[in-house]
Structure formats: C-alpha cells, structure tokens
Image (tube, coloured by chain):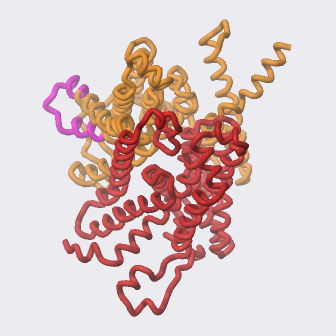
Amino acid sequence: MNNPLGKNFALLEAGRRLFYILLLSLAVGALFILLIKENPLRSYVALFRGAFRGKLNFGNTLANFTPLMLTALAFAVGAKGGAFNVGVEGEVFLGGLVAAYIGIHWTFLPKILHLAACFLGAMAAAALWALIPGLLKAYYRVSEVCSTILLNYVAYNITSYFVTGPMSAGVANAQSLPVADQVRLHQFLRPSSANVGIVVAALVTLATIWLLRKTTFGFKIRAIGTNPLHAEYVGINPKTMLVKAMVLSGVLGGIAGAVEILGVHGYYLDNFAAGVGFNGMLVSLIVKNNLILVPVMAFILGALKSGALGLQQATDVPKSIVDTITAIFIIVGTMEGLFQVSRKKRNKKSEA
Amino acid sequence: MEFSRIFSSSLIYATIRSATPVIYAALCASVTQQANILNIGTEGIMLVGAFTAVTVSFFTGSWIFGVLAAMIAGLLMALIIAVGHIRYNAEITAIGIGMNMFAIAITKFLLKALLGKSGSFSEPGIVGIPKIHFSFLEAHEGLNAIFNDWSITEVFMIILIAAMSFFLYKTVWGLRLRAVGRFPMAAQTSGIGVNALRYQALAISGLIGGLAGAHLSLGYSRMFTENMTNGRGFMGVAAMFFGGADPLLTAAGCLVFGFADSVGSRLQAYGVPAQFVLLMPYVVTVFVLSLSMAMKISRDRRKKSSLFSLSGKGVSAESAAV
C-alpha cells in the first residue's frame, strides 16, 4: 500500500473492516434471536451487562480474556510461520497438566523457583507436543490442520486419563489435588476468577510482539510464512523455521495452560480448557493474525463469552447464540473480497 | 485376554459399521479435493446434517424426509463455503474452521430453542434408517454376523464409492473436474468453466456430507448429541489425504480407522482404560497419514525428473499448505 500514512492507515482499515463485520454478525445474530421470538435489543443489553456490570461480571471478562490472548498469540505465531496450528487446545491441556503436577509435587522448591518450574514445565510439555505436527509438516508434508485437530483429541484423552487415574484427588469430579498455595496466582475482583495471570499474559504478549517484529528470529518466521521459496533463496531453512514457529506456538499454549491452572482453578480439572484453544484461534483469524489487534479482539470475545451467561439468565435466549455470532463473525471475516468491493468503488469515486 | 473373542467374524461388520460415517466424510472431502479445494468444513456439514436429520425425522416421522432434509442442509452449508471461497476469496481452511464452529454453535442453539434440550436429544419418535434383514442368512452364524442387518445407508455407501469412482475417472465431467484441480489456468484455457465446476464439486460435497450426518444420527445411532461428529469429519479429511482423494483408496483407509475403533471398544472389556481406547483411532489415523505421506515423498523422489517437477502436483499435502 503506497499510502503516505503507511502502517497506521492499514491498521485503521483493518479496524474499520472489523467494525463492519461485527455489525453484520450482530445483525445475523439478531435475526436468529427474532426467530425464537425474543427481543434482540434487550438480549444484547443483557449480554453487555453480563460482561461489564459489577465486579463479578467484569472480573470474569478479564479472566476469560487472559487465556484467549495467549492462545490467540499461539495461533498467530504459527500462522506467521505458515502453519495453521489448530492444536493450541491440546497444548493448553498438556501444559496445564504438567503445571498442575509440578505445582502439587515439587513443594521442596522455594516459591519463586517453584513457580518458574511450573511455567517452564508447562512450556516444555506443550512445546514438545507442538513439535510433533511441526516435524510431520516440515519433513513429511502432513497437513498440520489434520494432524493437530486429531492430536487435540489425543491430548485431551491423555490428560483425562491422568486426572481420573494416577493424579485423581478421589472426589466425585475428575480433578487433581490442589496445587501448593505458594504457586497460586493472586486473584482479585473476587468472587470472579480474575487473577495476576493477566499481567503474565500482557508481558508475554509484549515479548512476543517484540520477538516477531524486532528480531532476526521473528523476521525469519515471517519470511517463511510469506514466501517460503524466497526465504529458502536468501538462506533461511523453511523446514527448521517452521518447526521453530510451531514450538514457539506450543510454548505460548503451555503458558496459557499454566495460567489457567494456577490462576483460575488451583487444581487440574478435567476438560478445563474446552474451547480455549479454539476461541483463541478464532480471535487470531478474525484479526488476520495481526499481533497488535489480537489483545483487542481477545478482550471483545472474552466479554462476549462472559456476557453469554448473563444473557441466558436474563432472557430465554440460549447462550450458544454468542458462539453462533462469533462463528458468523469469523466466516464473514474470512471473506476478504466482501468489503473490498465497496472500497474500490469509493476509491474510484474519490479519483473522479 | 481371549484373542478369538476380539477377532471374531463379527469384527468385520463392526469395522465397517464404525468406518461408514468416516467413509462418507472422506468422500465428502475427496470430491472437492479433486478440484483442489480442501474441505475442512466436512465436520460442520456433517454435524448440521446429523441435527437436521434427527429433527425432521422426529417431526415428520419419516426417515426419508430426514435424510433428504439433511442433504439439503449440507448443501446450504457447502454453498456458503463455496460463495465465500470462490466469490469472496475466503481462505479455505479459515472459512472451513469457521463453518465447523458455526455448526457446533447453531446445532446447540437450535437444540435448545427448537427441541428444548441441551446435551443430547433422544426420543422414541425419531425414526431411524431401517436395516436390511435376510432371514435365510440366520442359519449360518458367520455369514449372519457379517452380512445381515446392514442399514440402508451402509449399503448405499458401497454404491456411492463405485459411482464416485466412475464419475471421477470415466466421465468427461470427472476429467474436467480433475483438470481444474491439477491446473486451473490450463483448464480455463481449454474452455472449461472453472468456477462452475468448483461450485458443483462443493455442492456435491455438501450433499454427501449431509448424508454422512444423517447416517451418523439415524443409521449409526438414533439420537443427536452436541458435537456428535467428534472429529469424524477430520478423520475423513485425513483419510482423503492418504487415499489421494481416490474414492476407493480413501474408503480403504477409513477401514483402518474403523478397525482401530472396534478393536478398541472390545479391549475396553478387558480393563484397558477408556481414554486409551478413545484416543486409539486418532493416533492410528495420524500415524497412517504420516506413513502414507512419507511413502509418497520417497516415491516422488524416485521418479523425479526435471520435467516432472514442472507439472502441477494436483492432490498433495502441499495444496493444503496455508
């Protein structure tokens, strides 16, 4: 784009597009709400209240926002490197499991080291898990979409086995023993589950943006994602870089798992991350993997998720309407040609 | 552990039974892959089909209407993908994933709004797809276990594989479709309506995907549960990859999955943890997929010449690269 405003203009354009798509999907959502004879306006107000009104609701929005931002980043990093990593969910599960295990058993460590061990363990486990589809894609051309989706089921079943078997707390729910108090992340805005994990997530986000935008490593990842042939020509090995992008994606997924376990639950809960990985992927897809917009969109989606409960309580609209709207949002969002047509027309007008 | 009880003759039908939904899904993905469109939305098409089939069967009391409605619902889903991808340049993997999310959400929403249920819907009023019973086979135990009581859609699956192989490889339409998949520009130059064929491929894929869902909810079981496809659509896509989008090879690949699934469910009776049984088909699928891709690469390498590397790859994992 040879516009004098350059980058900022592109960001503005992306924001404008996002706004249109949001309006359109809210309109389609309203249609569905009308279909079951409810008032869309009242429902949306209830949704908004459910997301922001009061300590509990706002806290839950923040608590939803934290893992979403991390998983969205995890997906975005993979996508920058040219891998469509649907497996963030599995990474979160395994990362959470390892964080819980270390949190429960390694109590001989002092507080800071123990906390670090939890995070490092989670990162390592998730990175190893992401390594599998990365290697398969790089060296055997196995579609990473397929392998990561299927491996998600495997990861879930592995964690489910541990939490109902060897690591079970022996209570009615499938959950582990609580982690040591010293590794719990401090909660605020009680009784919501907002916690200090949000600071961790923010720092990790900044670090990732810096890594991808300002370092050679980040440049290499972006290079293989944009044009692997050119990257190879200038001496970047696309195969190893792809694997590294996947591993980085896994590291971020693992952090998300650790934050969820140590911040929100305090023990490993079976199926605790259902949808966290997928929703993160949605966030990233909607903003086209733009790292600056990822936190913004993660916040919007986090608010929608937390508002959904309020919506269901205040009206007769099932909370799955929010997922429906989000899905429409992404479907419309992927159609790149949709709002470009109107822009071309406008450009022509301004030229004339 | 008694191996004779696990590997009995009834295992053959059990394998086919658990493979059939995946085979339908794989055929749904194959037909678009022949036109070089990776239909990740298979899972969602199937799920919407499953829901529609159960709902219509419940309200009309006819499984035929249920199946037809499911196919129409699948068609609509596929057409959204088609319009998004072909007309508005949507990235196929992204819109496919979007459709899958949409399918999960909208079926949940309608399950609650239309039927007032959450979780699952199972009523005696749902009319399932009938099974074909031959009374003369009852005398022979082995044949009875293998050939008796197939549901109509399981039999139709075999016809569909044959029909698809015929249409793809023996008709002008199939040749054109594959030409579009191999090298759209050349196809266009020779006067083939590229986009029309792409729309047709997705439409057919939608019909098959809807049928896949209908079979899952009315033939394989007789109920609807949230997210009941449970990755079967994706397994179908994986099977499509290792079958190279050839209907027959693809279906054969699905049998591997069906085998893992039915052996697993028998092992459960011998104290193998449920989670290992559940994860086995996925592990097997990933493993077989990787193995077949590795073999394909070594095959390609052997016959590689300067001429060969110029021609389009057609159906390969690279076309799935994002």
B184 or B209, which is in the foreground? B184
Task: Looking at the picture, tell me which residue is in the foreground, A102 or A90.
Answer: A90
Can the viewer see residue B268? yes
Residue at left 53%, top 82%?
Answer: B132
Tell me residue B84's x, y (percent): 66, 40
- Extreme residue toward the left, this view: A108
Count of marks placed on residues = 0
Q: Residue at x 53, y 29 (%)?
A: A299
Q: Position of residue A188 (x, y in %)?
A: 41, 28
Front residue of this view, candidates A53 and A96: A96
Residue A41, given in percent of the width and then of the height, sits at 72, 40
Q: Characterize the magenta stretch by its predominant secondary structure.
A: helix
Q: Residue at x 35, y 73 (%)?
A: B11
Q: Can you tell which quarter of the image residue A81 is in?
A: top left
Q: Quadrant of residue A141?
A: top left
Vertical placement of B304 versus A13: above or below?
Answer: below
Q: Which residues are magenta?
A: A97-116
Residue A287 location, x and y as percent?
Answer: 57, 28
Viewer-proximal residue, A310 or B131? B131
Residue A114, above or below B177: above
In screen coordinates, is A50 left or right of A45? Answer: left
Give residue A349's quadrant in the image: top right
Give chain B's shade. red
Magenta span includes A335: no
In the picture as drawn, the residue positioned furthest to the top comes out as A4
Assign the N terminus of chain B to one quadrant of the image: bottom left
Chain letter of the orange region: A
Q: Tell me, yes or no, whether the highlighted magenta stretch contains residue A101.
A: yes
- Tell me if residue A259 can be seen: no
Q: Residue at x 49, y 63 (%)?
A: B21
Please tell me whether residue B271 is drawn above or below residue A134 in the rendered image: below
